[in-house]
Amino acid sequence: MTANAKTKATSDLLLEAVLSSLSDDKAEDVVQINLRGKTEIGDYMVVCSGRSSRQVTAISEKLVQRIKDEFGHASRIEGKDTGDWVLIDTGDVIVHVFRPEVREFYQLEKMWQPSPAAN
């Protein structure tokens, strides 16, 4: 997309771009969580894994660049230097990219997903 033809960043379009970027970069175990009505931090949260610190960093950098290219705004990014857990705030979509061991330790998505009904 050219600089003159930036797409308006709605949360659904941002989510679509995020999921597409994660798929292109071979992110694993991608979980999408609808946050509407649960919090003011955003409309969606996406949690995924990379196989190594290097892949986590690469997934994150490419995602930030894609959002900038497609929507014309910079995302906030934290944790890129260590590559264990990177947080990307695109505005309405919050993305967490983990190494698998770190993701298992924090179990972040369990905090936001509805609990299964007890049998």
Image (cartoon, helix red, strand yellow):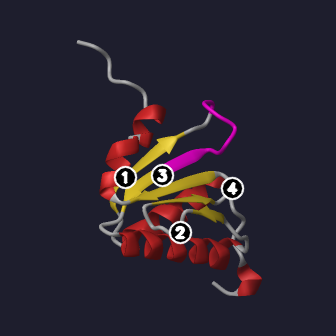
Image-quadrant location for residue 71: bottom right
User: Given the current orientation, which residue lies at the most extreme front position?
Assistant: 82
Label 4 to label 2: alpha-carbon separation: 18 Å
Whether 42 is drawn above or below 19: the answer is: above
Residue 1, given in percent of the width and then of the height, sits at 63, 84
Q: Residues within 10 Å of mark 2 (few under 14, many from 20)?
A: some
Residue position for label 1 = 102
Label 1 to label 4: alpha-carbon separation: 24 Å
Disc on the earlier residue, 3 or 2: 3
Q: Nearer the viewer, mark 3 or mark 1?
A: 1
User: Given the current orientation, which residue lies at the most extreme right position?
Assistant: 4
45 in magenta: yes
Question: Dot 4: what SS?
Answer: loop
Disc on the earlier residue, 1 or 4: 4
Q: Nearer the viewer, mark 1 or mark 4?
A: 1
Residue position for label 4 = 91
Q: Name which residue type carries label 1.
A: Val
The residue nearer to you, when weighing 24 against 61, is 61
The reply to whether discs 4 and 2 touch (Cβ–Cβ < 8 Å) is no
Question: Dot 1: what SS?
Answer: helix
Disc on the earlier residue, 3 or 1: 3
